[in-house]
Image (cartoon, coloured by chain):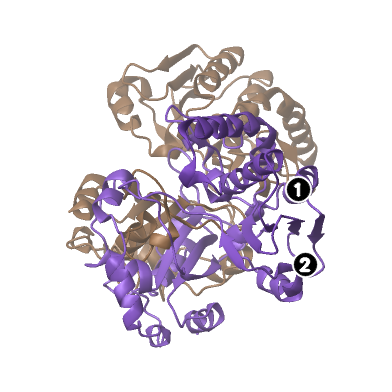
Chain colours: A purple, B brown
Amino acid sequence: MANTESATSTERATVEQFARDYFDHLAPYVRLESVSAQHRGIQETANWLQHTFRELGASYVTQWDELGGNPVVFAQFQGASDHTMLFYNHYDVQPPEPLDEWHTEPFEPTFQDDGTVRARGIGDDKGELMCRLTAVRYLQDHGGLPCNLKFVVEGEEEVGSGHFADYVQHHAADLAADVCVWEGGSKNGQEHFTVTGGVKGILAFDLSVRTADVDLHSSLGAYVDNAAWRLIDALHSLRTPDRRLAVDGYYDLVAPMSAATKQAVDRMDFDADGLRQRAGLRQPYLRDDPKLASVNEPSLTVNGFNAGYTGDGVKTVIPREAHAKLDCRLAQGQTPQACFDLIRA
Amino acid sequence: MANTESATSTERATVEQFARDYFDHLAPYVRLESVSAQHRGIQETANWLQHTFRELGASYVTQWDELGGNPVVFAQFQGASDHTMLFYNHYDVQPPEPLDEWHTEPFEPTFQDDGTVRARGIGDDKGELMCRLTAVRYLQDHGGLPCNLKFVVEGEEEVGSGHFADYVQHHAADLAADVCVWEGGSKNGQEHFTVTGGVKGILAFDLSVRTADVDLHSSLGAYVDNAAWRLIDALHSLRTPDRRLAVDGYYDLVAPMSAATKQAVDRMDFDADGLRQRAGLRQPYLRDDPKLASVNEPSLTVNGFNAGYTGDGVKTVIPREAHAKLDCRLAQGQTPQACFDLIRA
């Protein structure tokens, strides 16, 4: 709230009660299964957002879809001053699988004992937008918005925001604002709110191998090649013994860190021990200075691998195909296309 | 039939019509989903076999289960002579997955245009036992069995027959016979029936890696280890660049081939080009002499690999666990335990 600093405890309790009461009104946003990777629930979610922005009194609400990809929802609210704040959010979420690892229903927002809410995408970043919309409602019920607001909510953040830069170019005039806030973030192990300035780029791709039209019997294993083995060998060849990328020229693209960035990294909160404990890590960090690696070290991650029979028991099969999903986190100076070209070369 | 050589075409047609009519009576055997790897349909199938042997007039039918594992069904028939033939079969089948690759229902026997029947396990080896039971029925309807018959049908062949050797020891007197036939086999590319003398041993095991309690976000990929990468690296380390096993002492266990075996291998039918075409192999054979490799070369096959997210689209995850299924084909002189100990060492 704009007046948090001077809020009395009574005012704070009123606001908290309001937010709690209003939660049910916004809960359908979480129930919409807007999984961009699986092409699920996208238009329904964009529709819900447009309806909700209108209901909250937005002066202008629309959907941008003329450039392809998932629709981008845009809304504008008139406020008391000429200043304009722009909020960037995304309505898409990551796939909820594996489903049997959930203790609650992924798309049913569930209050935990500590007062937090658990649901797919609630922290990245449906919950952030719900907080903002709650604030809009509260302010409009208590004297109106202090400034103009704009919201731009895209639906491809979880799959790399492939179309968003083009939409920004195309609608630069609509998006003009005095300040832009990207909703997101979390608390660290010391319960400090984290503020992030700049993030790595990302390149994601699939690798597939097919060695035959049919799965073969493993009695032929001494002389017939195997898609799983070929993919294992190919992936292994992409890394050096110290687990960096074994791709010629890859690290030459990384821009040197400026003195200012180095200073900022030095001052950064980084709770290496807390992460180790919370995640139950069994292996040492790959780098002596994980904080520095987190900022400026490229990575190549196998997100998934599947081949052949993976159920219970034994199946004596030579898999005819194997698939891996990978992503690269890019350091400053690296572009997705340049890195992809080097990896493919 | 015993009198095939002298059968007239009329007799042959009569027999073929009988077999076709009797098929429906035996078809329930295929519909029983006796997947040993998945612990499905085992006792039901053993019950069906015992019932069917009794119905066909067996003088003695029983189930051996006192040593653990899936029950072994044993049946005896009295014939006209003192000679006894023993047939070894197994009632278990491989898992039918992946189901979407089937053009017919896996557990519904379906006649193809060429007169063959397609179903899970029909060729290994439910169909073989069904042929034999059809012959028993026909002979009993046409003058009786020419000799004593014994059938032993186990339910763990597809998972390595872990208990069968013990059952054979325990019931050696019941199994005594003048000749034993292991039902199975196929035609090769030249439509020659194949007769196999001796097969490789097998060792199957799973490898699993767990690096954390939870999947982590791939933005941490530069410094947090990844179960998929660890398993890829571990598997890669098990092979030499020429795709043999990189396990100390492994090949020392292989017994030299005798002159007689070498001669037999020379005379063996081996249709390398036919296999290449039928299976649509994209890669060269791993050995210059695949026929020799098929007889005496150990192998290590990845039967399956799974880790992380393997669905559509992108999921920016560091898998916390990764699993591989492997089997080793063993050459003469290699025992499963000795090979497992060497691989583990």
B43 is higher (above) or lower (below) than A97: above
Residue B216 position in % (x across, y down)? 41, 52
Local crowd size for mark 2, using a 10 Å CA cut-off: few (<14), some (14–19), many (≥20): few
The amino acid marked with disc number 2 is Gly
Q: Amino acid at mark 1?
A: Phe
- The quadrant the C terminus of chain B occupies is bottom left
Occupied quadrant, residue A28? top right
Between marks 2 and 1, how big is the CA–CA gap? Answer: 23 Å
Q: Which SS class for mark 2?
A: loop
Q: Chain of mark 2?
A: A
Q: Which mark is residue A53?
A: 1
Q: Residue at x 54, y 77 (%)?
A: A336
Pointer 2 residue: A68
Numbered disc 1: secondary structure: helix
- Snapshot quadrant of residue B313: bottom right
* Place of residue A11 in the rendered image (x, y in percent of width and height, measured from the top left): 53, 33
Q: Nearer the viewer, mark 2 or mark 1?
A: 1
Image coordinates for residue A209, horizontal then vertical, percent: 54, 67
Along the line of sight, the residue nearer the viewer: A275 or A310: A275
The residue positioned 63% from the left and 65% from the top of the image is A161
Image quarter hosting the N terminus of chain B: top right
For mark 1, does the 10 Å Cα neighbourhood hold few (<14), some (14 to 19), or many (20 or more) residues? many
As drawn, the label of residue A170 is none
Same subunit, tags 2 and 1: yes
Residue B111 placement (x, y as % from top left)? 76, 40
Q: Is residue B264 left or right of residue B248?
A: right
